[in-house]
C-alpha cells in the first residue's frame, strides 16, 4: 500500500511558475505515492471576512476544508507549497495536531 501525501497549494490569480511547479511535483509524486491535492484560490467572496482572515493570518473556512480533507483522506504526510493568503499560515497548527 502506498503512503498518502496531501499537497496543499494556494493558487495564484494568474497561473505562474509556482503553479506549474506544483503540477509537475504532483505528477512526479504520483509515481510513488497516493496523492491528493487541496487547492485554495484567492478569489474574494466576502470582503469583510477576507480582510479579517488576511490580517489575522487565520482563515476559518480554509481550516474547516483542511480538517475535512485530513479526516477523509487520512494522509501520512502533508506537503505545503504556498499559503498566501487564502490558505493562511493557520493551517500549520492544524497539521501539527
Image (spheres, rainbow, N blue to C red):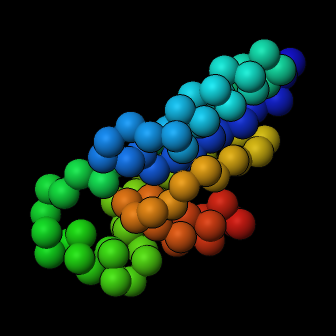
Total of numbered circles in the picture? 0
As rendered, which of 77 and 28 lies closer to the eye?
28
**Residue at the image point whose x is 64% and y is 26% from the top:** 24
Does the image show residue 46?
yes
Q: Residue at point 69% right, 47% down?
A: 79
The answer to whether 96 is drawn above or below residue 38 in the figure is: below
Q: Looking at the image, which residue is at 40% across and 64% down?
A: 85
Image coordinates for residue 57, horizontal then vertical, percent = 43, 77
Image quarter (top left, top right, bottom left or bottom right) of the N terminus:
top right
74, 46: nearer the viewer: 46
Quadrant of image for the C terminus: bottom right
Percent across and percent down for residue 90 are 52, 71
Identify the residue shown where x is 30% and y is 54%.
Answer: 42
Q: Answer above or below: position of 41 versus 91.
A: above
Residue 54 located left or right of residue 32 = left
Specify whether 80 is left or right of 86.
right
Q: Is residue 63 visible?
A: no
**x then y, percent, for residue 31:** 78, 16
- In the image, 78 versus 29, the foreground residue is 29
92 horizontally vs 12: left or right: right
Return the x and y of residue 68 as percentages of the image width and height.
Answer: 49, 46
Q: Residue farthest to the front?
A: 17
**Residue 46 sits in quarter:** bottom left
Determine the residue located farthest toward the bottom in the rendered image: 56
Amino acid at each position: 500500500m502506498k503512503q498518502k501525501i496531501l499537497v496543499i497549494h494556494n493558487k495564484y490569480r494568474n497561473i505562474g511558475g509556482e503553479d506549474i511547479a506544483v503540477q509537475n511535483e504532483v505528477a512526479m509524486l504520483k509515481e510513488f505515492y497516493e496523492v491528493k491535492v487541496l487547492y485554495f484560490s484567492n478569489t474574494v467572496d466576502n470582503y469583510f471576512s477576507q480582510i479579517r482572515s488576511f490580517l489575522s493570518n487565520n482563515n476559518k473556512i480554509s481550516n474547516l476544508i483542511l480538517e475535512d480533507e485530513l479526516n477523509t483522506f487520512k494522509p501520512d504526510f502533508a506537503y505545503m507549497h504556498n499559503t498566501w493568503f487564502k490558505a493562511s499560515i493557520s493551517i500549520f497548527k492544524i497539521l501539527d495536531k
